[in-house]
Structures are given as structure tokens and as C-alpha cells.
Image (cartoon, coloured by chain):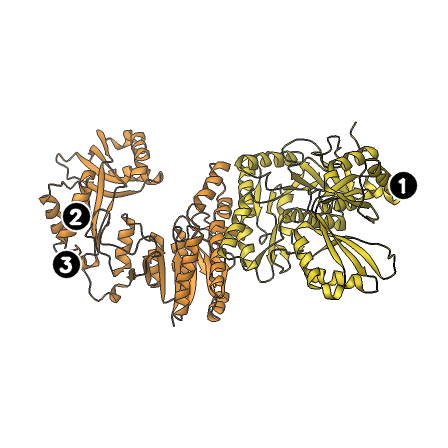
Chain colours: A orange, B yellow
């Protein structure tokens, strides 16, 4: 007998028929002899409606009241699913965040889970009762409802799995697993059976939006085995787990891309100590996240070109911050380019294998694709290229690294 | 400075613009120097949607889960109104039933309020904070959300007013007060400035659906002064209060009618002790409420005709119960008639004035309207007449008792 947490997202519980479908899915796990806790999101569309109402009341609303309003979406789903499970003859009850309780800090709208008191829930599960938990929420100091931020139901599920010492946390979603790359672009993309937490984090952060980054970090910290699988098809998904659980490691686990990038080049910046701090300090102060940075070697010993990337949505703000500081920064020109894409190859295997970067550069060169910026981490190599080459680059790299499905 | 409770029903908070309107209304009371608690219903339509979802999941659903789902409607409104009040520069916060807490019994779906802990709320109100309370709900033993049944927000408001020792409980609704009779039928109907609890109870129970009966009973018990007024117009409504607060008492306060009546006549029932119990016992066992009862004097000493009324919705069930018991009851025939209306004149003045009933009978006779059944209470005389005479009877009685507006 295993103890498992099952999590169903907004599209999986999008209407009454789908909630009934989820109930049947949960029943199968119970009948297989498992203790089951289910975490649910709001029915798709419901959260947007609630958020929209808050915005209509006031553009800058009290985050505590926003949380009180928006958290009701998941409470509705949890009650409805409990009814659906009972209708199938199971013992079940719903739990709002405050009922468990799931205690959070007081950063309303983006709260972090401090602790989960599972004693009453476990007592029920040991009697065969299915716990249906409203995701995305908890109770903050002062007895106020707090939400965990968009996608927070994944975090709820992983945190609950950790607190329950669950054998597995199954995240049901509208895709059937994690792929080597975007299957809409590369038809030969393969579904991965297993992937490490580290790789999943890199994939998630560069644009493969399968699991929320925070939930993967939490799973890694607490060694929660997370399975991503489809709520509409009946087949195994992808298991996110510790590296030592993966016997046959591939060199690469996947190739990700992000179109949410913009490039800024400062022409002829003074080449002297402290200039980087002078540029990136004001950007950080204005909540602009800078990702890749490259600084050319100074040719004349006096000035250099500095290139970096920011999120596309931050581009205008970034330009304004820099132009406002032009006097201090003493650069000659600013070139902004949002016509770029970041392509990353990811794999824990590259720790022990040389030549991975070399193969990337050669493959792109063979296709005539110019690399504008490069950045690397222990398990990732990212390049910035012109956006129109996105598909070409992904397909060429996928083939070059031997990831194509047979 | 006064402490007041304001309650807004579903149509008064039916959309975002109306909630903003409510916020302005509340602001005026705060600026007049009052301590204010507001009780809100769900936005109109929201509760029906939630109820419908529960029914779609399972026709016979767990009432506790139903409560968890349906109570979210009021929680949404309370959060939105708190945002709206803050946007107007007021200090405000929302309170779910469990946050106050409003403690109820465990009769989910129709829970009764046991106690309200107002200490934290009063502390806030004394600092100038408006308390925005989700109506219709509380927390039952076992930490589960319980609802008070349809229309329960009126009861929430009156109970809160009692617990807060409020000077007044203003119930904002889509009518501007309590009228001497239905103004859609009698154009000369007058709005009452004041009415006693007892009269309001009689009016409410015979069809003038302005206030929920339970809320009036509770107001009477705790001497809560309740004002019914329009949320769309800016003028005083009707105050429901103790008799001794009404200086100039009218003989009658109003004339009510109910079309939700059906008449059953059992022909030639055996005239012997115990026969009434034999008939009304099985009806009560089958949850059929019997209202008016009249038994003719037996002419032959052996049998009599027995006539009584039931709710229209209960007529078929009542007939079946009686026919199933025909052997025991020994009657010759059953005549059912749903083509009837109950008209009632109501007033505490009739305690000390004779001739009120006589005037009713004379007035109806003068219009050629036959009275089928009569019943009386200390402050009410009701007659059952053919339904087609409803308007004629109401107008004639309204004039005869001198209630017509000048």
C-alpha cells in the first residue's frame, strides 16, 4: 500500500464532466489499495473571473482581500470533487487551506508555506477517507486566507506530499509528460520516462511550462518523487526524481527555448572598474531581471560594448532606466533588439562529458545560424540567436544530440 | 454616534457597479459618524450557479460539501466590497463566517446560529474599520462551513446586530419598504413608516416576501430594530420594531395574500373522536403542512365534511397520503381545489377593536365574493376565496379599512 498525492489543474477540472472523470481516476487509485489525498485547482476560467472582479473594484487592491476572493475558486472545486467521490461510493471530504491548516507567511498573493498540520487528515486517510484539498492557498498569521501565487496548486501538492511523507506526487495536467523538446515544433520529440530535479528546474525556467519552478525546488529539497501525467489519457507520464534513481542516464534530457527575451547592447561603455555595478544596480532597483551578460574585450583599453538580456516585458522599463542614468554610465549608444530567442540544451550528463558545447556551436554554424550571446551553467548551455531560426535550431540540435524518436 | 449593521441582498450586489454603489452608501454612514458592519449576500446568480454544480455532481449530495461550495459566493462579495470601501479611502476588512467566528449547530444547509464572537470585530470597528461580513454562513462543530438556508443573510444580519448591540439593522433590498398591501395590485397601497415584529411576521408568512421569517423572529426576540429600505433609492424605509415604539398605531397594518394555497375537502367523514388525528397525523408524517382547517357541524350525527388547506406544491402528496389511508379514514369523497387564494388582514390594533372581522365579511359580501374558509389569530383574520377575486378583494378591503394613500 502506498500513500499518494494526486493534483489536478484547472483544465482537468474545467467542467462538471471533467470533475466526474477525475473522481473515477481517484477511485482507481483507492481501489488499488492506496491512501489518497487530492489537490485541486479552480475550474478553468473561474480564477480569471475572480481576478477580473478584483481589478474592476480597484486596480491597486488590498492583497489580503484579493486572496480571500480568489481562494474561493479552489474551495468550490474541492467541495464538488468530494461530492463526486461520495457519489462513487468512496468516503471523502474537502479541506480548505485554513481547515487543514496549511500555514503560510503573510506575503499575500505570493505566500510561502511554513508548515502543514496533517494529523487530522492522516487519521481520515488511515480510515480510508480521501482528502480533497483546495490548492493554491493557506492561512496566514492573523487568520487571513493567503494564496501562493499563480500555479501555486503544484506547490500545494508537493508540500502536502512532503508533509504526508507520500510515496509519490502525481501532477495531472493537459500534457502527458515532459518531452525532450517542444513537440509542437519538433515532431520527433520524445517523452522522457524520468528526469532529475535539476534538469526539470532548468527546463521549467527556460520555457517548458509543465511544472511551476517553486514546486520543483520544493520537491528537490524534500525528495518528493513527482510524476507529470495526462488527466485525459491513461498512460504513465514522466517521473521527476533524484539522479540516483535514474539508472540509464542520457547525455542530454532536453532542449528548451524561450521567446520571452530581449537583448540590449550598450555601445562604447567606459571600460573601468565599477561600470557593471553602475548599470545593473539601477536595473535591479527597478525590478528588471537581467539574464545573460556578455562583455567584449576592450580593444582600445578605454571603452567596450556590453550586451545583456532582459525579459521582453521589461524591455521598455530597462531602456528608460538606462537612459535616465546616461550621464553616469557614459555610453555612446543603446541598441535594443527583441527579435531574439534563447535556446538551451540541458542535461546532468554534461557534467562528465566534454564536447557538448562544441557540438551545439558546430550544429548551429552548419545551419548558418549566428550565436549572439552564450551562457552556461553546470548542466545547461544557452545561446541567444535570431528569433526566425527557432524551429531550425531546435530540430537540428534535437537530431545532432541523438534525441529523435525512432 | 450609533452602531449599525447594513445588509445588502443579491440584487443590491448583483454586479461590480452595484457593489461600488453599496460602497458609497456605506461610506455615507461612516462619514455620519457611525460604527458600521456590513453583511452581504452572494452576487445574484452566483448562488444558483454553485447550487446547480452541486446538483450536477450528485442529486443527493453531502450537505456539508454543499455548504462548503455554496458559502463561497458570499465570501467573494465580502472581499470585493472590502476592496471597494478601501478604494473610497475607508479602513475595511472582510470576514468569512469562520473568521468571525459565527458558530452554528451542525444542521448543514439549515444551520441555526448558536453564538457570535464579536470581540475582534468590535475592536476593529472602534478603530473606525468597517467590518464586511459574508452572510448566510457560519462554522459548525468539527470546523466545517455551515449555511443558514436560503435567505439566511437576513438572519446573519439580525443576529450580528444583536451580538453587536447595534442601534439598528438596515436591510437594503429591491423594494423601498413594507407596504399596506401589494402595490403591484393596489396602486393606492401606502408604505408603512413603522410596523411591529408581530405584524411583520404575519405579513412575511402570508406572502409579502420582504424579510425572511426567521430573521424577524430573531429581531423580535432580541429587540433588534430592523429597517427595510431600498438600495437603489435614497429615502427612509420601514422600521420593524417593538409595539411601544409606535406612537400612532393604525388599526390595521396591512392586507396580505397568498396564492400558494390549495383546498382539500373530505366529504362525509365519520364524525367520531380521533378522526382529525387520523387524518392530520399521516399528513404531518409526510411533511405536509396543513394551514386552515374547518369542520362543519354534523347534520346527522354520523358524518361531516372536513375542509383544510395545504401548500400548492404539497397538494399531490397530500392527496396520495389521504387516498392511501382511505380504509382507515372512511370518507366518501375527496375534492381538491387549487383555484383559491388566502387573503389576510393584519394589525395589532384588532386586539382592542371589535368589528374588524365583520367589516371584512361585509366588504367581501358586497362584492359578491364567497368566503370558503375562515381562520383567525390574535392579530390576523384570513379568508380563503376563489382565486379570480384576488385583486377585487384586495382593493375593496384596502379602501374599506381606510388604508388608501391620499
Residue found at the far top of this picture: B406
User: Label 1 neighbourhood size at 10 Å, few (<14), some (14-19), many (20+)?
Assistant: few
The image position of residue B383, as x and y in percent, is: 79, 45
The image position of residue A140, as x and y in percent, is: 49, 53
Read off the residue under disc 2: A395
Chain containing the residue with disc 1: B
Tag 2's secondary structure?
Answer: helix
Read off the residue under disc 3: A353
Chain containing the residue with disc 3: A
Asked if residue A384 can be seen in this view, the reply is: no
- Whether pointer 2 and pointer 3 mark residues with C-beta atoms closer than 8 Å, the reply is no
Does B263 appear above or below B330? above
Considering depth in this image, is B328 or B57 the residue closer to the camera?
Answer: B328
Read off the residue under disc 1: B355
Alpha-carbon span between mark 2 and mark 3: 22 Å
Q: Residue at the location (73% across, 30% down)?
A: B187
Q: Depth-wise, is mark 2 or mark 1 nearer the camera?
A: 1
Q: Quadrant of residue B21?
A: top right
Alpha-carbon span between mark 1 and mark 3: 107 Å
Same-chain status of marks 2 and 3: yes
Amino acid at each position: 500500500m502506498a500513500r499518494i498525492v494526486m493534483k489536478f489543474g484547472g483544465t482537468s477540472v474545467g467542467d462538471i464532466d471533467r470533475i466526474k472523470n477525475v473522481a473515477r481516476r481517484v477511485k482507481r487509485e483507492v481501489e488499488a489499495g492506496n491512501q489518497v489525498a487530492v489537490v485541486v485547482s479552480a475550474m478553468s476560467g473561474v480564477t480569471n473571473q475572480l481576478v477580473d472582479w478584483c481589478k474592476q473594484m480597484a486596480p491597486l487592491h488590498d492583497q489580503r482581500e484579493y486572496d480571500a476572493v480568489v481562494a474561493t475558486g479552489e474551495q468550490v472545486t474541492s467541495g464538488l470533487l468530494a461530492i463526486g467521490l461520495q457519489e462513487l461510493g468512496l468516503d471523502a471530504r474537502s479541506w480548505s487551506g485554513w481547515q487543514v491548516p496549511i500555514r503560510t507567511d503573510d506575503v499575500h498573493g505570493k505566500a510561502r508555506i511554513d508548515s502543514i498540520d496533517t494529523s487530522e487528515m492522516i487519521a481520515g486517510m488511515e480510515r480510508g477517507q480521501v482528502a480533497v484539498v483546495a490548492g493554491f492557498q493557506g492561512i496566514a498569521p492573523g487568520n487571513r486566507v493567503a494564496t501562493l501565487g499563480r500555479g501555486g496548486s503544484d506547490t500545494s501538492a508537493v508540500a502536502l506530499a512532503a508533509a504526508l511523507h507520500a510515496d509519490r506526487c502525481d501532477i495531472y495536467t493537459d500534457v502527458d509528460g515532459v518531452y525532450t523538446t517542444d513537440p509542437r515544433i519538433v515532431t520527433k520529440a520524445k517523452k522522457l520516462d524520468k528526469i532529475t530535479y535539476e534538469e526539470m528546474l532548468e527546463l521549467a525556467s527556460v520555457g517548458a511550462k509543465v511544472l511551476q519552478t517553486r514546486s520543483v525546488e520544493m520537491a528537490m529539497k524534500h525528495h518528493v518523487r513527482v510524476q507529470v501525467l495526462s488527466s485525459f489519457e491513461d498512460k504513465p507520464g514522466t517521473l521527476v526524481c533524484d539522479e540516483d534513481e535514474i539508472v540509464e542516464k542520457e547525455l542530454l534530457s532536453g532542449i528548451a527555448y524561450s521567446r520571452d527575451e530581449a537583448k540590449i547592447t550598450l555601445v562604447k561603455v567606459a571600460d573601468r572598474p565599477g561600470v557593471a555595478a553602475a548599470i545593473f544596480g539601477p536595473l535591479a532597483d527597478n525590478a528588471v531581471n537581467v539574464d545573460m551578460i556578455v562583455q567584449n574585450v576592450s580593444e582600445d583599453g578605454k571603452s567596450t560594448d556590453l550586451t545583456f538580456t532582459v525579459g521582453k516585458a521589461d524591455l521598455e522599463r530597462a531602456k528608460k532606466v538606462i537612459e535616465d542614468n546616461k550621464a553616469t554610465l557614459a555610453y555612446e549608444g543603446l541598441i535594443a533588439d527583441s527579435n531574439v530567442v534563447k535556446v538551451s540544451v540541458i542535461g546532468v550528463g554534461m557534467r562528465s562529458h566534454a564536447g557538448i558545447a562544441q557540438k551545439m556551436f558546430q550544429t548551429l554554424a552548419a545551419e548558418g545560424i549566428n550565436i549572439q550571446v552564450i551562457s552556461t551553467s553546470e548542466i545547461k548551455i544557452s545561446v541567444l540567436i535570431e528569433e526566425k531560426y527557432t524551429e531550425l535550431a531546435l530540430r537540428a540540435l534535437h537530431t545532432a544530440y541523438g534525441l529523435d524518436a525512432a
